[in-house]
Image (spheres, helix red, strand yellow):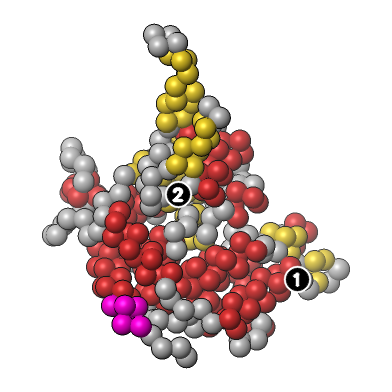
Amino acid sequence: MPEVSTNLVEDIAWARHEMNKLRERLGVVVLEQGQAVDSLLETMLSGGHALLVGVPGVAKTLLCRALAYYLDLQFTRVQFTPDLLPGDITGSEFFDGMRMEWNVNTGPIFTQLFLADEINRAPAKIQSALLEAMQEGQVTLGGKSIKLPTPFMVIATQNPVEMEGVYPLPEAQQDRFLTRIDIGYPPALAEARMATANAVNHNHTERGAAYLGIGGDSRPILDSTGVTRMQVARSKVVIDERLALYSVHLAQATREASLVGSHRILRLGAGPRATQAMLLMAQAHSLMRGGYFVLPEDIQAVAPGVFRHRLIPDDSLGWGPSDLDGYIVDLLNRVAIP
């Protein structure tokens, strides 16, 4: 193992301390969803975008609002609907008759944390309006590229595809999301506490902490400068070349999926972005536990979220989400750990 510098020790210690505070605060707002909270924080540390999937009412939007609040980030929420236009997200060019010149109106995408609520309620051309912003951190309007604020993160919420009135995300769009985070129903006791808190705070008129139902110390924990510092700390977590190859071998195994009877298991395996996402998320997972090096366990912990939205099973198998999760677990058991 290479030596760990004093600066790295200090950076990791500071980042882990701040992340633990953030995790604790979010755990008060969204009860009994610790795994989802951790995955979202790891995605933020990685500088990527997250896809939150769950049925209505499991606090997906509330979690995003709370994250933006505690990080003191500019926050914009857009409800995706079938009649939404690309310009409603990115902005548009207009002609100023007084000055006789073309100008640009920037859209709600020009923010630091953009929530695309129920992204699968809008058709593909609307979903695709996010592609340049997510990949390049910029938007082209009137032939000019305009940089987005930093840090910049897109969180898209999505209802299960088997519900009516939804449009499945194109594969290219899904690949831009660093990870998919599935949020299930809370335990009965947590659901009862959430319902009670909602009844008590239902008639609120203020935003901020009261709007989120937050009690106690409700001040933001960090600001955009602090978020950037945490992302820099994450980038310093050491990745051994053997573990980089391990992540590649996992992705390659999905591209060479074996047969079930006469049917191929996967119609589409994981591409190179999956390998990159796995290492970014593994660094973040290591940082969250206070580690200085990525371990095989870090890669295995983040692999399901990285693969879940990138692997497309063969239609003839009739697989559901649990079948795909079972395949990923089997994959992690089959590919040798270096």
Position of 316 relative to 292 (above/below): above
Any mark on residue 257, and which? 1
Position of 252 relative to 213 (above/below): below
Residue 3 percent across, percent down from the top left: 41, 88
Q: Residue at x 45, y 49 (%)?
A: 154
The total of numbered circles placed on residues is: 2
Magenta stretch: residue 25 in it?
Answer: no
The reply to whether dot 1 and dot 2 touch (C-beta < 8 Å) is: no
Residue 270 percent across, percent down from the top left: 66, 64
Magenta stretch: residue 7 in it?
Answer: yes
Q: Please indicate whether residue 6 sits to the left or right of residue 87 in the image.
A: left
Residue 36 showing in the rendered view? no
Which label's residue is closer to the chain start, 1 or 2? Answer: 2
**Span highlighted in magenta in the image:** 5-10
Residue type at tag 2:
Val
Q: Magenta span: helix, strand or loop, mainly?
A: helix
User: Image quarter for residue 272?
Assistant: bottom right
Q: Nearer the viewer, mark 1 or mark 2?
A: 2
Residue 34 vs residue 269, the one in the foreground: 269
Question: How far is disc 1 from disc 2 in space, using C-alphas?
Answer: 31 Å
Q: Residue at x 71, y 74 (%)?
A: 253
Residue 52 vs residue 192, the one in the foreground: 52
Position of 266 relative to 53 (above/below): below
Residue 233 showing in the rendered view? yes
Q: Residue at x 48, y 34 (%)?
A: 90
| Element under disc 1 | loop
Q: Residues within 10 Å of mark 2 (few under 14, many from 20)?
A: many
Residue type at tag 1:
Ala
User: Image quarter for residue 114?
Assistant: top left
Q: Where does the C terminus fall, quadrant-wise?
A: bottom right
Label 2: which residue? Answer: 154
